[in-house]
């Protein structure tokens, strides 16, 4: 392609990074999946399940929107917490647009206020996205939107329900108009730049949470050890679930291995749906004490290791 042709293509298309920032459980991952139309990030009832900048890629008309789903922003206490918060804000500063998500039910609580205050330092255009609007009366929604726009100058405001899809199409079209002109960064058929090995590990981690959200702390991690495409077209995957104590290992295994069998069955089914081929999934559980202080684990999750 000549330089002139490339320039013409750039003029005809738009492409940009859009960061989603908000408190834990505000619905960022659900919104990414709704905008993309396919599952690219994990969704869990347990806070802090998104650890790294997992991007969803949306094609809308002549625009490519690259969604940066940041970890929920909260008050960090441990080393892992600090790494996630740092990653979230770096994603916001590096993006072309920033969507600030608010939970319609919670309104502008202390967490939301702190995020709005810090978002003021981000130089890009900011879009207010009020999620879970189906759970709140309209008068309360309008008051919330007015209060948020008084605190920070938002370029646009959208009221949506990421779960039902209400308002998501309008938001997608607006993002397509607002990303800057330029050529696409990714092939049109690619939904996420997260490698399938990583996505498969995230899916298994989600199933662990859905089974054990009360019994098991979120300091567990899953790594895909091997990914082998077999001659019959199926995929053989081996994954290791790491926990910090032997008591947690027993919880993940369950009586007679029942819990891990159920986790494996659900994860295998979902990975097969995404890959479109049969999947043979083998799960192992190991104790790795203090993995939350191991720099290698942070690098594998796409996080910067905080030295303090």
Image: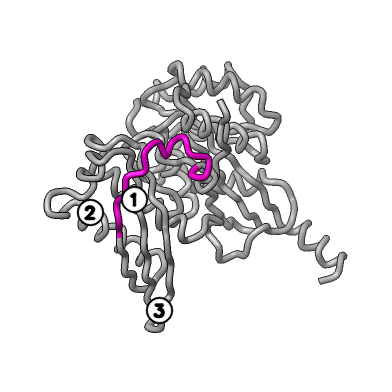
Sequence-first disc among 2 and 3: 3
Residue 65 as seen in the image, left or right of residue 222: right
What kind of element bears circle 3? Answer: loop
Q: Nearer the viewer, residue 246 or 99?
A: 246
Q: Specify the quadrant of the image occupied by residue 261.
A: bottom left
Residue at figure coordinates x 32%, y 31% from the top left: 135
Q: What is the crowding at mark 2: few (fewer than 14 residues within 10 Å), some, or many (at least 20)?
A: many
Residue at the disc numbered 3? 230
Residue 177 as seen in the image, left or right of residue 1: left
Marks 3 and 1, how far apart in space? Answer: 23 Å
Sequence-first disc among 2 and 1: 1
**Residue 18, placed above or below residue 198:** above
Q: Which corner quadrant holds the N terminus?
A: bottom right
Q: What is the crowding at mark 3: few (fewer than 14 residues within 10 Å), some, or many (at least 20)?
A: few
Residue at the disc numbered 2? 260
Residue 101: x %, y % from top left: 49, 32
Front disc: 3 or 1: 1
Asked whether the beta carbons under mark 2 and mark 1 sit within 8 Å of each other, the answer is yes
Residue at figure coordinates x 54%, y 47% from the top left: 172
Residue at the disc numbered 1? 241
Residue 18: x %, y % from top left: 60, 42
The stretch of residues the image draws in magenta is 283-297
As drawn, the residue found furthest toward the left would be 256
């Amino acid at each position: 392609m000549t330089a002139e042709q490339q320039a013409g293509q750039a003029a005809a298309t738009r492409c940009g990074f859009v960061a989603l920032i908000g408190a834990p459980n505000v619905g960022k991952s659900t919104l990414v999946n709704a905008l993309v139309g396919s599952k690219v990030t994990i969704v869990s009832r347990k806070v802090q399940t998104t650890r790294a900048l997992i991007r969803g890629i949306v094609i809308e008309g002549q625009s490519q929107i690259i969604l940066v789903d940041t970890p929920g922003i909260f008050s960090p206490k441990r080393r892992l917490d600090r790494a996630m918060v740092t990653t979230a804000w770096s994603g916001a500063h590096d993006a072309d647009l920033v969507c600030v998500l608010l939970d319609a039910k919670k309104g502008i609580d202390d967490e939301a206020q702190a995020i709005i205050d810090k978002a003021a330092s981000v130089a890009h255009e900011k879009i207010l996205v009020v999620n879970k609007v189906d759970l709140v009366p309209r008068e309360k929604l309008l008051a919330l939107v007015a209060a948020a726009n008084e605190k920070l100058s938002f370029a646009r405001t959208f009221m949506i329900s990421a779960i039902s899809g209400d308002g998501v199409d309008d938001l997608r079209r607006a993002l397509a108009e607002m990303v800057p002109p330029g050529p696409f960064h990714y092939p049109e058929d690619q939904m996420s730049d997260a490698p399938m090995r990583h996505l498969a590990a995230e899916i298994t981690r989600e199933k662990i949470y859905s089974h054990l959200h009360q019994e098991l702390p979120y300091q567990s991690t899953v790594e895909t050890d091997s990914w082998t495409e077999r001659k019959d077209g199926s995929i053989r995957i081996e994954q290791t679930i790491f926990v910090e104590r032997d008591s947690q290992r027993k919880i993940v295994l369950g009586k007679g291995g029942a819990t891990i069998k159920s986790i494996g069955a659900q994860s295998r089914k979902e990975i097969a749906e995404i890959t479109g081929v049969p999947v043979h999934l083998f799960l192992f559980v190991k104790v790795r004490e203090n993995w939350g202080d191991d720099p290698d684990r942070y690098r594998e999750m796409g996080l910067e290791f905080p030295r303090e």
